[in-house]
């Protein structure tokens, strides 16, 4: 469990930055080099490389090597861990919304009975 928590911490920390999230979004379309990933941003390639190191450390990307080309590719496994973690809370909120729905129906039913008695 501690390893899973550490993995979640690293993934959430990596996803906390909008540039890193944009890089992951770009990588959903396929592998890309640092220069390709840097194009839409007004930051330097070394800055993009630092973002890639954080993403790689969190296991969200992997880097290959083909001569001079080091493509980055998305590794979606850690995103599945986050989805599973969030799913636990979805059940919590679904139960809360169901309870609220039942409460509102009870109030509406009582309100209709109260109006009928007044007539």
Image (cartoon, helix red, strand yellow):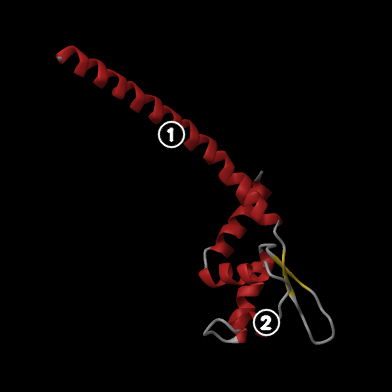
Picture layout, residue 44 above or below residue 102:
below
Tell me, yes or no, whether the two marked residues, 1 and 2, touch with CB atoms within 8 Å. Answer: no
Please tell me which residue is depicted at 80% across the width and 75% down the height of the picture. Answer: 64
Quarter in which the N terminus is drawn = top right
**Viewed as shown, does residue 104 lie left or right of 46?**
left
- The crowd level at tag 1 (other Cα within 10 Å; few <14, some 14-19, many 20+) is few
Query: In which quarter of the view is residue 65 placed?
Result: bottom right
The location of residue 117, given as percent across then percent down, is 18, 12
Q: Residues within 10 Å of mark 2 (few under 14, many from 20)?
A: some
Residue 76, which numbered label? none
- In the rendered image of this protein, does residue 99 appear above or below residue 30? above
Q: Which mark is residue 97?
A: 1
Q: Nearer the viewer, residue 66 or 26?
A: 26
Residue furthest right as drawn: 67
- Which mark is in front, 1 or 2? 1
* Labels 1 and 2: the sequence-earlier one: 2
Considering the image in quadrants, where does the C terminus appear? top left
Q: Quadrant of residue 113?
A: top left
Q: Residue furthest top?
A: 117
Residue at the spot of label 2: 34
- Secondary structure under tag 1 reads helix
Q: Nearer the viewer, residue 119 or 7?
A: 119
Residue sticking out furthest to the left: 118
Instruction: Give the residue displayed 30% in from the left and 24% down from the top.
Output: 108
Viewer-proximal residue, 34 or 30?
30
């Amino acid at each position: 469990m501690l390893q899973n928590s550490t993995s979640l911490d690293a993934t959430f920390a990596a996803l906390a930055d909008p540039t890193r999230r944009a890089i992951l979004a770009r990588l959903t379309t396929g592998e890309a080099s640092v220069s390709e990933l840097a194009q839409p941003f007004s930051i330097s390639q070394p800055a993009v490389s630092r973002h890639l190191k954080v993403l790689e450390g969190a296991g969200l990307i992997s880097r290959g090597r083909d001569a001079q080309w080091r493509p980055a590719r998305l590794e979606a496994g850690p995103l599945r861990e986050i989805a599973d973690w969030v799913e636990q809370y979805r059940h919590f909120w679904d139960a809360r919304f169901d309870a609220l729905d039942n409460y509102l129906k009870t109030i509406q039913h009582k309100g209709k009975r109260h109006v009928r008695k007044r007539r």
